[in-house]
Image (tube, rainbow, N blue to C red):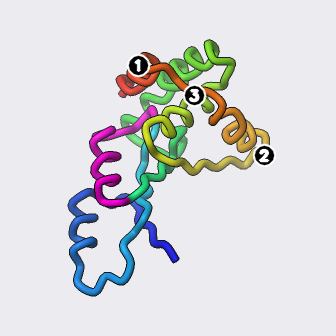
Amino acid sequence: TSLAVSNFSVDELDCLLRSPGLARAPVLNQLPLGVAYHPGHPRVLTQNRERGLLVQAWAPLGGSLGGAAQRALPTVRAACSEVGARYGKSGAQVALRWVTQSGAAFTTTSRKRSHLEEDLNGVFDFELSDGDMARLSLLT
């Protein structure tokens, strides 16, 4: 049996991992992460990895985020679509590929089966260039 945590900062992880009597350490930390919102990326990914945790991005397409991330979505979506056109991919596929190439897993949801299929098919059969990764990382 594996354990996961959600939205744990590095300090919270360290406190948990030092807890006496901890039977099992978590293996996954779900964090808001995507092209539209990636505070401390890639430091956060590295710090989690150093503690033996995989990061799973929730809201990787930005839909359920608020504030500045929500305001940045039109710019982020346009940039992802522009990059995607060069690869024959949708903007969503580019955004999800950015997450996986950054070293995280992702979870996504939709009420439309076609969106889920698009999100999952075609994300793992291409690689973004270093330039495209850097450009998308600088959007927010």
Dot label at residue 113 = 2
The percent position of residue 72, horizontal first and vertical second, equals 43, 28
Residue 81 on the magenta segment: no
Task: Tell which of 136 and 21 is nearer to you.
Answer: 21
Numbered label tally: 3
Q: Quadrant of residue 133?
A: top left
Q: CA distance from mark 3 to mark 1?
A: 12 Å
Q: Are marks 2 and 3 in contact (CB under 8 Å)?
A: no
N-terminal label among 2 and 3: 3
- Position above or below: 115 against 80: below
User: At 31% from the left edge and 46% from the top edge, which residue is drawn?
Assistant: 46
What residue range appears in magenta?
35-52
Q: Type of residue at label 3?
A: Val
- Residue occupied by mark 3: 94
Task: Give left or right: position of 6 versus 48.
Answer: right
Please say whether residue 138 is visible from this viewpoint. Answer: yes
N-terminal label among 2 and 1: 2
Q: Are marks 2 and 1 in contact (CB under 8 Å)?
A: no
Q: Type of residue at label 2?
A: Arg
Task: Give left or right: position of 90 versus 133.
Answer: right
Which element type, helix, strand or loop, lies under badge 2? helix
Which element type, helix, strand or loop, lies under badge 3? helix
User: At 38% from the left edge and 27% from the top edge, which residue is drawn?
Assistant: 137
- Residue occupied by mark 1: 135
Q: Type of residue at label 1?
A: Arg
User: At 49% from the left edge and 72% from the top edge, which residue is drawn?
Assistant: 2
Please say whether residue 70 is visible from this viewpoint. Answer: no
